[in-house]
Structure formats: structure tokens, C-alpha cells
Image: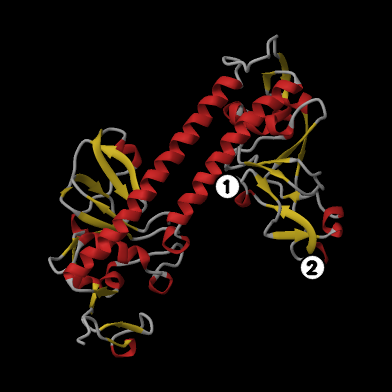
Amino acid sequence: MKKDIEIIPVSNKDSFGEVIPKNWEIKTLNDACDFLDSQRIPIKDIDRTKIPGIYPYYGASGIIDYVNKYIFDEDLILLAEDGANIINRSTPIAFLVNGKIWVNNHAHVLKARPIIDRYYLCAYLESLKYDKYNTGTAQPKLNRETCEKLPVLIPPFPEQQKIANILNTWDKAIEKQTQLIEKLELRKKGLIQQLFTGKKRLPGFSGEWKKVKLGDVAYIIGGGTPDTDVDNYWDGSIPWFTPTEIGEEKYVVVSKRCITMDGVNNSSAKILPVGAILFTSRASIGLKAISLREATTNQGFQSLIVNKDNDTEYIYYLLDVIKNKLIRNASGSTFLEISSSSMKNVSFEIPELIEQIAIANILSLCDNEILLAKQKLNKFR
């Protein structure tokens, strides 16, 4: 019986794995596409404000603005040229574009040759790890010379199309799930605006809300960093959080680094109780999480310990509502920072404890629904 595909050791081809089909080829990216980089034109932020329009303006990670002119009008692939995403891959590095667009000098512009399916090539480029191709020093970079030499595994054209069709099916599922998450988050945002302003009251609740200050409902405490040159202060059992670890999850338990009791006693770090709201107070003001164990933070926080007359979960969500007020009370020349005294004086209206709990329960259900949707999205990916 004749075999449709014969496989041979990859050592005869390249280092893609143990085996590849015999009728597949390995070419360079320069063989697979034309580079249109010379046609790119960057526009400064301030200049783009003068030419707003309908045409997408692309950078390394996708659309960053819209302008009133375009420089490309065809089916293309964009491949990030620089940026941390080349290594950490938090967003796609290769993506399809079509129609009238503008591209700056942070993304390579590729036009697939007739030998290769555009969707297949884009998916292939997205699958690669670029660590070994990085030519940057201050930040990761994929220069054109390096990209032109990237090896590309090319099946026969009909097989490329079949692979592309399968991947396209999953992409559609990912897109649909992403849209669902956006709708759920928008619904939650709308509920917060209604429930936290008293515009919408839950059944069974009435009466006036009282005006209070943040300092009336929570004790606010800063953080600190033990001397990093003293070994006895580090690698202990007490979680020590930094702002980069906050914002993705509602609850946190494990930190990247831990400190010892000696570290606490010899710094301005304070042990926060279970249930403390860790709130970032400088640079990116307003990232937050609830700690499910005793923990400490660095000085980039003003954490809240909610008193017994108020609900921690409610105050957690309330911080989104008053975030702009908090930012307006921040100060600083190098970066904005809000002090505990400024936070304490931010005022708002608040219902009784039982209504706080009811409102927080609804938003917790929203969070759970969003979390399940994101978990499903991760499975698709």
C-alpha cells in the first residue's frame, strides 16, 4: 500500500522536532513573503490628534489609533518588530490585517507570496518562540535581517489551507468567547454604576444612604521594603506583594517573594490581616486584590482594613467607583502617588451593612461568571 506521506529524520532538514513529512519544505521568511517595511510611516502621538479618522493605525501589538489617511490597502501580515511582548507574549505577535490601514515602524509588514497561504503563515509565525532571535538590548527587538532568515516550515499549498481552516475554526470560537467576556464585563460595569450610586435599589431596601469618608470605613496602612542586602530579612514565610502582582485576580494568596519577621521588624512593612484589600497607590493607582492570608506589601500600596460595620467585598468594588476621585487627590512630579491621609478624606455615600452585602453578592456572581468564561477562553487558546 502506497503511503501518502513519508517522514524522514528532521536532522536532514532542520531542528523542528524529531520528524517532518517528506513533502514539506523549509524556506526562509524572505522566501515566503515580501517585506514592505520601507513603506511604513510613524506618526507621533501629538500629530495623530490632528488627523483623527476611520483608518486603523497599527503598532507592534495591534491598533493603537485611527487616522484620516492610509498607506496600505491589501491583505497583509504584521509581525511585531520590538517591545516586551516579543518575549512575554501577553498579546499576539503576528496578526492578519486587510483593507485600508496605516502602520508605524514597530511592526514588520509582510505580504505572503503565492506559494503560501496567508492565514497559515500568520499562524506559523505566531507559534514560534522568538527568544533566540532577539537582537535588542534595552528592549526585545526583531530586526529585519534576522526576520528574513527565520525558517518557515511549508506544507503543500492544499495542506496549508486545511491547516488554516482548522485554526480558523478555533479562532472564531476564541473571538466569540472574547466578545462574550466583553459583554459580561460591560454588564458588571453598568451594575456597579447603578448599584453604587443608589440609582437602582435592590428589592426590599430603602432609606437614605449616609455620607462618609474612606477613613470612616477602613484603616489605611502603607507598606515597606526590608533591606535587600540583609539575607535574614528574606526567603521567610510572610508573603510580600509588589504592584506588578496585583490586578489580575480578585483574591491573592501567594507572592513571588516572602520576608521574615526580622524583615518586618526592621522596615516599614506591616503585617496585614486576612481580608485586607491591597490597593496600589503610586504609578498605576487603583489596582487591587483581597488577601486570603496574612501578608505584607512594599511601599507602592495603601492597603485597607475594613472595619466591622462595613463589608470588605463591598468596599473592594466601591474602590472602582471612587478611583477617579482618588487619582485626583494624588500628587507627584516623577509619578503620581496618593497618601493615606489623602485617601482617608475621599467622601462618598454608603448604604447599611446588610445592603452592602447584598450588592457585593451580586457583583461576586458577575465575577464568577466572568472567571468561568475566561477559563473557557484559555482552553480554546
Res 80 → quadrant: bottom left
Task: From the viewer's side, name the closer residue of 292 and 336.
Answer: 292
Assign a secondary structure to mark 1.
loop
Contact (Cβ within 8 Å) of mark 2 with mark 1? no
Q: Is residue 105 above or below residue 32?
A: above
The residue carrying mark 2 is 231
* Image quarter of the C terminus: bottom left
Q: In the drawing, what numbered circle is on residue 215?
A: none
Which quadrant does the N terminus fall into? Answer: bottom left
Q: For mark 1, does the 10 Å Cα neighbourhood hold few (<14), some (14 to 19), or many (20 or more) residues?
A: few
The answer, for residue 333, to whether it is visible in the render is no
Could you tell me residue 276's position as x and y percent?
75, 40
SS for callout 2: helix
- Amino acid under label 1? Glu
Q: Is residue 230 visible?
A: yes
Q: Residue furthest front?
A: 1
Residue 160, quarter of the rendered image: bottom left
Please tell me which of labels 2 and 1 falls first in the chain.
2
Q: Nearer the viewer, residue 249 or 178?
A: 178
Image height of 170 relative to 54, above or below: below
Which residue is located at x 43 percent, y 55 percent?
Answer: 380
The image position of residue 227, as x and y in percent, is 77, 60
Q: Which mark is residue 248?
A: 1
How is this picture coloured?
A: secondary structure
**Comparing marks 2 and 1, which lies closer to the viewer?**
1
Q: Residues within 10 Å of mark 2 (few under 14, many from 20)?
A: few
Location of residue 48 by image quarter: top left
